[in-house]
Image (spheres, helix red, strand yellow):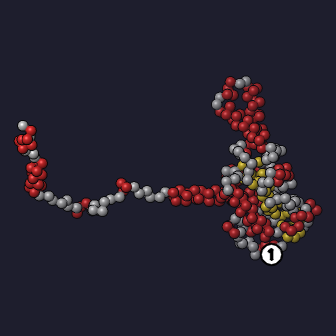
Amino acid sequence: MVNHYKSYLNKELPMAVVTMKSLLESGVHFGHQVRRWDPRMKKYIFAERNGIHIIDLQKTIFAIKEAYEAVRKVVSSGKTVLFVGTKKQAQQAIAREAERCSMFYVNNRWLGGMLTNFSTIKKSLYRLKKLEKMEIDGTFENLTKKEVASLQKEKAKLEKNLGGIKEMKEVPGVVFVIDTMKEAIAVAEARRMNIPIVAVVDTNCNPEGINHPIPGNDDAIRAITLFTSIVANAVIEADNETGLKIIENLADDDEEVVTDAAVKPNDEVEIIDYSTYTPETIDKSEALAEADETAGESIVDEDTLYEGHL
């Protein structure tokens, strides 16, 4: 089995998403005990060693590529990603990577209706923000200690369960799940809302109904961290592409503006080097003579002008 993967140690996934070596080092290929397997995961299992199923990492790599592209396209279209992982091994990685890519997450407890009844969840989010404002603007100072303690307890509970989706205005464009068995309610709600699901499925999980299943170990902290960071990288790449498109559009709009004031007459000569410039000299005597002649022509003899009227 080891020899089967040695030839892939330095093989990289297209777009440099992940390497086979990093998958092996993170223990992604270790599944559950044979007696705990789900027969629907058979196509993703490579072999059995010491009573444990070994996941085929070649299929894992291609599944990661497809999931990466799916997440990138969803984020590029302007939608968001919801990271879900409430098991202890996943809580820190889910929160850290979701915050790194500025997306939403649920890492403590999935409240029923977070997707199917989001309008009610929004009321709880509004309540959380109101309590935070009360704590800052000095409202707590006008209340009794008992009232303050009760409000702070309510705020801590809301923050614990809803802190990761506090700024979420609408349902996400895709849901990323660690352990579909533990997060069965989240998966069911996402399917009911027709939201694409990207999920890590171990050998004891059912991959059916998951839009983009990624076969792999969903119990090891290193494996969970690797999968979560890959999804976060897809989000960041999509954001960077969107930013570049905006910059390109601004550059296209920034065209040179030509006005009449900017157009020079054909007979005007532009002076480039003023050090060698010599203004044209004019003979003052000739200029004065021309002025006198012009003035003489314009003078009218008043006696002749009014001769006929006197």
Can residue 229 be seen here? The reply is: no
At 8% from the left edge and 41% from the top edge, which residue is drawn? 308
Local crowd size for mark 1, using a 10 Å CA cut-off: few (<14), some (14–19), many (≥20)? few
Closer to the camera in the image, 178 or 31: 178
Q: Name which residue lies at 85% across and 61% down.
A: 207
Is 257 situated above or below 135? below
Can you say whether 108 is above or below 280 in the image? Answer: above
Figure label count: 1
Which one is in front, 225 or 278?
278
Q: Which residue occupies the foreground of this view, 97 or 299?
A: 299
Identify the secondary structure beneath mark 1.
Answer: helix
Q: Quadrant of residue 260?
A: bottom left
Residue 281, given in percent of the width and then of the height, sits at: 15, 59
Q: Amino acid at mark 1?
A: Asn
235 sits left or right of 160 in the view: left
Q: Is residue 233 above or below residue 43?
A: above
The residue at the far right in this view is 35
- Residue at left 9%, top 45%? 300
Residue situated in front as seen by the camera: 258 or 91: 258
Q: Is residue 244 left or right of residue 40?
A: left
Residue 232 place in picture, x, y as percent: 70, 56
Residue on which the image places disc 1: 3
Q: Relative to residue 254, is residue 303 drawn left or right?
A: left
**Percent coordinates x, y for residue 126 in the rendering:** 72, 37
Q: Where does residue 1 sit, x and y in percent of width and height?
A: 83, 73
Q: Looking at the image, can residue 298 be seen?
A: yes
Q: Quadrant of the C terminus?
A: top left
Instruction: Please tell me which residue is depicted at 83% across the width and 51% down the height of the picture.
Output: 192
Q: Is residue 286 left or right of residue 103?
A: left
